[in-house]
Image (spheres, grey):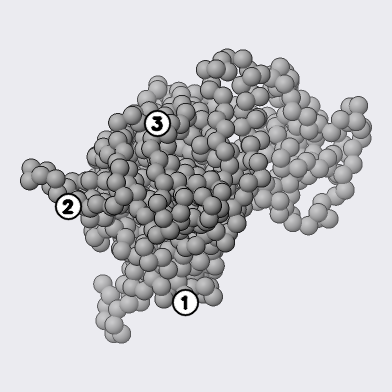
């Protein structure tokens, strides 16, 4: 340890190196109190119980999980005025604050596993007499150890450096530092993590930011401004592509002139038809590949708030990875900003369904229990893919394995992660790179028009990548889901899911052709079903009435036991064959909130008013025995076809993958809009062709 910062440009002539900044201490850009816990932690560290100490006792495991969710906050708080700048924080007299947090802890195990870095140097600059800087490390089990400490000798700024090895972080672990103030306030002016890296990796890469937008003009314009106004980010930006696919244009937003000003000639607006997220991102990928000047293309949603430093960190990490690597960020809840959706996601191979990685808690609240007190957060979480709400893809990967599949929405990002993995390019969901996103829990994507794309694209991805005969459990699970939707009177959902499976059976070669038209077809088809006709006005429906009151006055919202669920699963399909109660044809029998709209609840009713997840509307569900019989027969028929034809389909889809995802195929799909652009930009009287 020393009290001066040293910068080395070379070590020896055989292996020239340079010192490069990996990560710096940051504070919230807007002093938002809701996100302070992600940057600095005033609470003591109280680690939860180890899973092997708890053992296999179910009650003990559930009690520990509930205790972790509840949190351990003592009421200690940081005043926003303690934030002196983007990189500086004031620690009040007598306080101890920890930088062992999501944005300021150093994720040592990720650097150890994926990059060429073997040792890092931490340099902390503090000003104030009697201050102490303490450096800690953790292991994969979450236990922390003090590494070193030092105290200031006077009131002038002092920089302390610590050389730290990454050797002990094979399975997990972090580095961080705490600062303790003495009799007076202490200013933590900066904290920087640097490393000696090969000289040919000393310069940072650049990014093309690819944002697909659809009728969110203000949201998107604010995001553009947020990216463009950060000076630290500007050297990393090559081009910002905005794929405009809506009727409410970003350029018409009152926020746009400022965004255009701060981004300048880096901004490029591209208008095209509504080709969904995959069509928008594929256009950004194509433009990035054809331009050929940026190291990475970053996919980013339009409805996010970005931590700009996360882009810098993703680029830095990607630059230093051993091989070209997709680097993704985490997603926090825009409306509960200390809550993270998931720390890393995989495709469960037998079910072929996305889920959080093993031992990950979803919807984790860092304000309730932060990094130092949460054992599972210290494991390195390896993933199969990262959502395209924020995900940096090296251009060399796009050039080798192709662009997105033409799936409109759903499964394009997860399929791409699996495709890259098969080609030898891993994906890393990197701590410290994140956005705040509108939560998916507020959307109705399992029931509305999106259900078509969920099912079709899941099967397409499974045909391409499943290693199990006939896809493992996917066919059986899909059939069971259809029965559950039928029991719940969700006939429109069942019908469009059937159409999705028939389109899978038709083969891969029409995916590009139907990309601009399929959404309109699905929506038009759904309108014939009452369960798909949404009304915002509660008086649009008849009043609730029923012939007999519920048994013993129960409202049916109780959570059933496993035994009750199995019994209900056997009996409810039989009940659907019985004639409905006559009064249910004129009046819904109950109002069912979205949170309670489970198949086993709806299956007891002959009609119901069911609200949607976003809380804006409701629909009338009515049981139809004849429709039930028809759709059950269709369900078994189409799933038997899938089981029988799976080997042929898998071979066909895998053979076509390279063609479908090629730049040339996508150029054909984009031609109606690229030709229109060329004609509109051609000089008057000159043929654009």
User: What kind of element bears circle 3?
Assistant: loop
Q: What residue does disc 3 label?
A: 172
For marks 3 and 1, the one nearer the N-term is 3
Looking at the image, residue 12 sits to the left or right of residue 107; the answer is left
| Left or right, 394 with reference to 601 | left
Viewer-nearest of discs 1 and 2: 2
Q: Residue at x 67, y 33 (%)?
A: 486
Q: Residue at x 43, y 31 (%)?
A: 145
Residue 376 vertical position relative to residue 268 in the rendered view, above or below: above
Marks 2 and 3 sit apart, C-alpha to C-alpha, by: 30 Å
Asked if one can make out residue 484 in the rendered structure from this viewpoint, the answer is yes
Q: Residues within 10 Å of mark 3 (few under 14, many from 20)?
A: many
Tell whether label 2 touches label 1 (CB within 8 Å). no
The residue labelled by disc 1 is: 257
Residue 657 location (% of width, % of height): 32, 40
Front position among marks 3 and 1: 3
Label 2 sits on a secondary structure element that is loop
Q: Position of residue 543 (x, y in %)?
A: 88, 48
Relative to residue 667, is residue 505 depicted above or below? above
Quarter that holds the N terminus: top left
Residue at 58 percent of width and 42 percent of height: 43
Quadrant assignment, res 669: bottom left
Considering every residue shown, the one lying at the far bottom of the view is 684
Is mark 2 in CB contact (under 8 Å) with mark 3? no
Kindly report the distance in space between the C-alpha atoms of the residues bearing marks 1 and 2.
42 Å
Residue located beneath label 2 in the image: 9
Q: Residues within 10 Å of mark 2 (few under 14, many from 20)?
A: some
């Amino acid at each position: 340890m020393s009290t001066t910062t040293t910068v080395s440009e070379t070590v020896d002539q055989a292996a020239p190196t340079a010192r490069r900044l990996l990560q710096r201490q940051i504070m919230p850009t807007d002093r938002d109190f809701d996100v302070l816990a992600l940057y600095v932690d005033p609470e003591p560290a109280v680690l939860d119980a180890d899973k092997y100490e708890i053992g296999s006792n179910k009650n003990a495991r559930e009690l520990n999980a509930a205790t972790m969710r509840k949190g351990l906050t003592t009421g200690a708080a940081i005043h926003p005025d303690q934030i002196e700048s983007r990189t500086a924080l004031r620690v009040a007299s007598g306080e101890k604050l920890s930088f062992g947090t999501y944005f300021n802890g150093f994720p040592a195990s990720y650097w150890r596993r994926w990059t060429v870095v073997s040792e890092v140097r931490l340099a902390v600059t503090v000003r104030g007499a009697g201050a102490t800087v303490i450096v800690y490390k953790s292991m994969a089990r979450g236990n922390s150890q003090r590494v070193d400490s030092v105290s200031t000798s006077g009131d002038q700024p002092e920089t302390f450096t610590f050389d730290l090895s990454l050797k002990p972080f094979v399975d997990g672990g972090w580095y961080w530092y705490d600062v303790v103030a003495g009799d007076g306030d202490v200013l933590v002016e900066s904290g920087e993590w640097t490393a000696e890296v090969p000289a040919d990796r000393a310069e940072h890469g650049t990014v093309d930011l690819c944002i697909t937008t659809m009728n969110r003009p203000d949201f998107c314009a604010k995001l553009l401004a947020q990216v463009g106004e950060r000076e630290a980010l500007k050297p990393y930006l090559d081009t910002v592509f905005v794929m405009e696919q809506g009727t409410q244009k970003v350029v018409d937003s009152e926020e746009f002139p400022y965004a255009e000003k701060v981004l300048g000639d880096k901004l490029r607006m591209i208008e095209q038809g509504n080709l969904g997220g995959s069509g928008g991102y594929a256009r950004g990928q194509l433009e990035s590949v054809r331009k050929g000047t940026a190291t990475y293309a970053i996919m980013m949603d339009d409805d996010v708030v970005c931590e700009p430093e996360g882009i810098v960190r993703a680029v830095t990490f990607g630059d230093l990875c051993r091989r070209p690597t997709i680097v993704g960020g985490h997603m926090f809840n825009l409306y509960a900003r200390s809550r993270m959706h998931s720390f890393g996601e995989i495709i469960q191979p037998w079910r072929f369904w996305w889920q959080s990685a093993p031992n990950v808690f979803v919807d984790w609240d860092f304000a309730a229990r932060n990094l130092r007190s949460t054992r599972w957060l210290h494991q390195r979480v390896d993933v199969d893919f990262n959502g395209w709400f924020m995900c940096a893809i090296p251009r060399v990967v796009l050039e080798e394995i192709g662009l997105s599949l033409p799936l409109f929405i759903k499964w394009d990002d997860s399929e791409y992660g699996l495709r890259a993995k098969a080609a030898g390019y891993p994906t890393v969901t990197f701590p410290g790179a994140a956005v705040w996103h509108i939560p998916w829990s507020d959307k109705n994507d399992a029931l509305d028009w999106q259900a078509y794309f969920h099912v079709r694209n899941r099967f397409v991805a499974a045909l391409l990548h499943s290693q199990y005969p006939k896809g493992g459990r996917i066919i059986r699970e899909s059939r069971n889901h259809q029965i559950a939707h039928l029991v719940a009177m969700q006939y429109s959902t069942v019908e469009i899911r059937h159409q999705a499976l028939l389109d899978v059976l038709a083969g891969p070669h029409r995916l590009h052709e139907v990309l601009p038209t399929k959404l309109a077809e699905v929506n038009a088809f759904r309108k014939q079903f009452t369960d798909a006709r949404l009304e915002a006005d509660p008086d649009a429906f008849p009043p609730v009435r029923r012939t007999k009151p519920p048994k013993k006055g129960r409202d049916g919202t109780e959570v059933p036991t496993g035994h009750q669920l199995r019994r209900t699963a056997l009996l409810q399909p039989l009940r659907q064959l019985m004639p409905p109660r006559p009064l249910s044809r004129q009046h819904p029998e109950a109002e069912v909130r979205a949170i309670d709209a489970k198949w086993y609840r709806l299956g007891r009713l002959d009609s119901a008013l069911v609200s949607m997840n976003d809380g804006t509307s409701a629909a009338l569900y009515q049981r139809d025995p004849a429709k039930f019989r028809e759709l059950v027969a269709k369900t078994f028929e189409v799933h038997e076809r899938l089981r029988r034809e799976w080997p042929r389909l898998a071979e066909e889809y895998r053979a076509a993958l390279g063609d479908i995802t090629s730049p040339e195929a996508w150029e054909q799909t984009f031609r109606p809009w690229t030709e229109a652009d060329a004609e509109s930009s051609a000089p008057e009287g000159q043929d654009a062709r």
